[in-house]
Amino acid sequence: MTVVIPIIAFIVILLVNYLKGNDTSQLYIYIICVAILICSFFLAQEKPAKTLILFSSLAIVAMTIGLTTTGKVATFSFISGGLFCSVMWPCIFSLSIAGLGKYASQGSAFLIMMILGGAIIPPLQGD
């Protein structure tokens, strides 16, 4: 499923864009980024610390490429950076509550409250 689901998601994105009448030929090259994502999952061996290190490194590389290039390469690099960063939250969450024992539910609640606080407080401050 680790291989099949990302490919199906990519096909769905292509299909929706095609049905809407958009030119999807520019998106075909992005399958390389999906392949890198899939390979990275296997390299991390389902360990949160390894996954976090690997995907943060890939995000840094993608952002650096995006900042130093232009055009489609930069666009796909920034999109890939967001994709790699999206994988980090489950790793951060599991590493944060590791070792809390009977306090794991309270730790989880505090993490979720911080997410909500990060969404509510800045608009209230006018930032």
Image: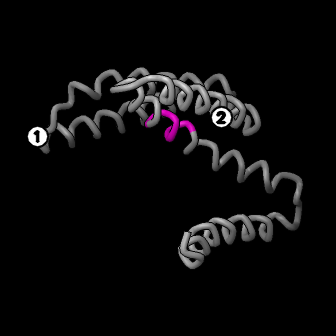
Tell me where the magenta segment starts and ends, as one range. Answer: 79-84
Q: Nearest the camera: 37 or 65?
A: 65
Question: Where does residue 106 sit, x and y in percent of width and height?
Answer: 80, 71
Residue type at the position of mark 2: Ser
Label total for image: 2
| Residue appearing at x 59%, y 76% in the figure | 125
Quadrant of residue 30 in the image? top left
User: Does 45 appear above or below 119?
Assistant: above
Q: Nearest the camera: 80 or 5?
A: 80
- Left or right, 4 with respect to 120, comes to left
| Residue appearing at x 53%, y 28% in the figure | 62
Question: Where does residue 105 sit, x and y in percent of width and height?
Answer: 77, 68
Quadrant of residue 55 in the image? top right
Residue at mark 1: 21
Question: Where does residue 88 sit, x and y in percent of width and height?
Answer: 63, 43
User: Does 116 appear above or below 62?
Assistant: below
Q: Are marks 1 and 2 in contact (CB under 8 Å)?
A: no
Residue type at the position of mark 1: Gly
- Left or right, 12 with respect to 31, comes to left
- Left or right, 112 with respect to 10, comes to right
Q: Nearest the camera: 75 or 19?
A: 75
| Residue appearing at x 29%, y 39% in the figure | 13
Label 2 element class: helix
Disc number placed over residue 40 in the picture, else none: none
Q: What is the crowding at mark 2: few (fewer than 14 residues within 10 Å), some, or many (at least 20)?
A: some
Residue at the left extreme of this rendering: 21
User: Does 19 appear above or below 66?
Assistant: below
- Choose the circle earlier in sequence order: 1 or 2: 1
Rounded to the nearest whole Å, what is the CA distance between mark 1 and mark 2? 35 Å
Disc number placed over residue 56 in the picture, else none: 2
Main structural element of the magenta stretch: helix, strand or loop? helix
